[in-house]
Structures are given as C-alpha cells and as structure tokens.
Image: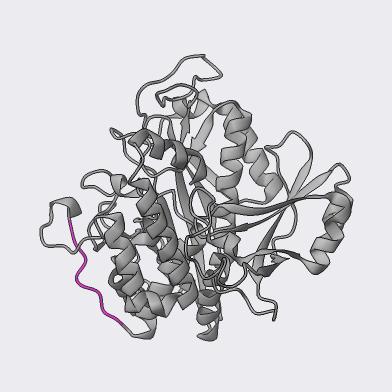
Amino acid sequence: MKNWLRKHPEVRTIRVAAADLNGQPRGKRVPVRFADTVVENGTRYPMSVLNLDIWGEDIEDSPLVFESGDKDGILMPTERGFMPMPWLDSPSALLPIWMFRESGKPYEGDPRHALSRIVKRYKALGLTPVCAMELEFFLIDDSGKTLQVPTSPRSGKRRKAAEIMSIRALDAFDTFFTDLYDACEEMDIPADTAISESGLGQFEINLMHCDDALRAADDAWLFKMLLKGMARHHGFAASFMAKPYPEYSGNGLHTHFSVIDKDGDNVFDNEGPEGSDMLKHAVAGCLAAMRDCTLLFAPHSNSYDRLIPESHAPNAICWAYENRTSALRIPSGNPKARRIEHRVAGGDVNPYLMLAGILGAALIGIEDQMEPPAPITGNAYAIEDLPLLCETWEEAIDAFENSEMVARIFPKELIRNLVMTKRQELHYMAELSPEEKTEIYLDTV
C-alpha cells in the first residue's frame, strides 16, 4: 500500500472510509504525510459511526452511544488498498477500511464483515461464490424545483423521453461516460457494458463477474461513490434512488451468482438448461428467505414505490427460466455459465448487506438441501396466489427482526443495529413531504 503512494507523489490527501449500515462512506481526511501511520496502525472512531441513520444522526437509545460510553473501534485497511479519487479537483486517494474490536476480532456491526462471514462459510464447504452486479441509475438535473434529465453536452437539448437501449441516449452523454470508464479503470472497477434504460435519463452499467464476493461488493460500493462524484463534476446529479420519478420505472441492482468448487467447476451446471440439484437448493433458500430479507433489498421509504406490479421490479416470490418478471431468473446460455439472477434489490441498497443476504440464503438452501416450488411460466404479475415480498417498510423491518433465517445469516448485533436504524428513519420520514424525502434520498443512497 505504501508503494502505491510513492508511485503517486502528486497525491496530497487521503480519505479513509468504511461503509455504514446504509452504505454511506464514513471516515476521515488525512494529510498524505501521515498515511504510513494509518496503513500500519489503522485509525479509530466510534463504533456508533457505522450505525447512523440516513441523516447521519446517532440512533436514539442505541447501546453503542451513551450506554457504552461511545467507545472506539479500530479501523484497518481492507485488502483493496489505495486508489485515486478522479472526481475531485485536487489529487487525492481513497483507502477503504473496516472495523475491528480492541481485541482484534471483527466488529459484528460492520456490513463488510457480515459478508466476509458468509464467504468463510462457503469456503468451509470447499465452495466459492462468483458474483456480478448490474447497477441502474438516473442522470438528473436537480438544480430547479422539478427533477429533469440534464441537457446533453452534445446538443444542448433535453430528451424528455425514455429510450430503451438507445445508442443516441448514450452518445448524448459521451464525454461523461468516457470520463466515467477512464475513472473506473483508474480505480480498478471492472465496468463492462452500458445501456440506456426505460426511465427518463436512466442507464445501466454492468460490473464483470468476480470469484471474490467481497471484491464484487467493494466494486459496487465504490462505483456508486464514483458515479455520484463524477456526475457532480460534470454539472448534474447521478442517483441510485429506487424511484425518483413516479411515472417511470425505478432503479434496480440485479445480482448474478454461481458457485464453484475446489477444482473451479460450476456446481450449478448439470450440462443441461435446467441446472443442477445444487442450483435448485440455492434457489429454494433464496425464495425461503426473500420475504424476511425484503429490508435488505428495499431499505428505504422510497424503495417501496418501486416494488409495484408491472413496473419491471418483482413483487412476487417466484423463480423461472429466462423470465424477467420473476424474482429469480435462471438465464439461458452455455451450461458452464449456469447461474441465478436475483432481481429484487433496488439501486439504493447497501451492496454488502444485500449480497450477504442473497448468498447467505442460498447457502442455507444448499446446507439444508431445500427444494423449490415449480418454476413459473408466463407473466409473474398475472399469476394469482404467489407469495409476496413485504409490502410496507414497517412490515419489512418487523419481518427482518423476527426471522429465523435472517438469524442464520447475520450476527445478532447487526440485526439489532439495522432494526433500530430503520425504526428511527421510519419515525422521522413520516414527518416529511414527498419532496423532502426525495431531497434526502437523491444524493445519499
């Protein structure tokens, strides 16, 4: 890590940052001359900092604050190391960190550690998850009272229509996307194809698959930070908010995953289109935990505006082959690449918690050799009597808190902290107008 800074003498300051439960980066700005100390000894800040609400406020009555004296955790660099921050004017570097207790044990309330625990459970079985994510987002001009698509730097016009997979829509922001891809390369974020989506000024970028789930979640977390920073650098906003426009489809974050064994073979592959028994066990686990994990996939008040019928977001718990109306889709193609696409999450999620929930549920299905119901055919929105995701934020909080499957995926402290956070947000969001909610969510999530 020290060598990276020596190769980049232009860097003047560093940021050390960890993800809180909402996926917000929390940390410090440090002069580069003190960087070696951070690398060797880490840094310290209160454990409660990873358990703030969406406004960045302490959680009332949290045992992490006054009850415990608001004591510190120790934050050490992750294996990711330093990377540039191309959206800033002054040369700066970001150092991702995660939290440990004074004893050296991982802090159970850190979302990155929650995912690490699940990966270790796979490793104990000789298995490794392989993950890739597709992130949808809006480019937005938020300078006025009404949100609208930014003017094209090429034409100076606003294209006030959705254009699914339009090359023209991509070319309208060619300079921005070129700079974004250059920045992804600098930060070693594996950004692949970009497309225009069905919303006004909506796009999607795919991140390449990775056999390190922690790195895949890092990529998504860092990409969200980078995209929002680069958009502001270009004079507009980028948002992963689940539903910024009531009349258009919302932002999803679709996760593709398979599992390989010690020999590198895909255990979901049975050389045919239907997939192996292991794939079906994983599907069954994901379905069984899906309702109780709604909070991970829809963590905010605005998230539930996206999960409505016929909105390109699933609200029914089901699976299918090559069917984008289902919550779980098994894509067609080469059997060696057989995988599950989990389509429930919104763009506003914490990638670490979301991926821990998905992989943890799949692992329970594999461990318990669970069997799924029959796959559906046709339009999932038109099929009656399918079980549903939680329909309200409050219902999702309660389901998450009381779930036996969630308790098998996450440590007690993280469950408690997340539930307290969301109940506090639920209370104070009820006092806000829709415009005020949009204002808070547009930049944060």
In-image side of 89 versus 158 (left or right)? right
Can the viewer see residue 383 in this picture?
yes
In-image side of 237 versus 293 (left or right)? right
The x, y position of residue 344, in whole percent, is: 34, 56
Which of the 4 image quadrants contains residue 311? Answer: top left
In-image side of 36 versus 72 (left or right)? right
Compared with residue 330, is residue 206 higher up or lower down, i.e. above or below? above
**Picture colour scheme:** one colour
Which of the 4 image quadrants contains residue 270? Answer: bottom left
In the rendered structure, does residue 375 fall within the stretch colored magenta?
yes
Q: Quadrant of the N terminus?
A: bottom right
The x, y position of residue 63, in whole percent, is: 52, 71
In this view of the protein, which residue sits in the foreground, 94 or 107? 107
Q: Main secondary structure of the magenta part?
A: loop
The x, y position of residue 377, in whole percent, is: 18, 58
In this view of the protein, which residue sits in the foreground, 245 or 423? 423
Compared with residue 185, is residue 267 higher up or lower down, i.e. above or below? below
Q: Residue at x 46, y 40 (%)?
A: 440
Can the viewer see residue 272 in this picture?
no
In the rendered structure, does residue 22 fall within the stretch colored magenta?
no
Q: Which residues are magenta?
A: 370-377
The x, y position of residue 342, in whole percent, is: 37, 60
Compared with residue 8, is residue 71 higher up or lower down, i.e. above or below? below
Q: Residue at x 53, y 57 (%)?
A: 58
- Residue occupying the far top of the picture: 156
Which of the 4 image quadrants contains residue 147? Answer: top left
Q: Residue at x 49, y 19 (%)?
A: 151
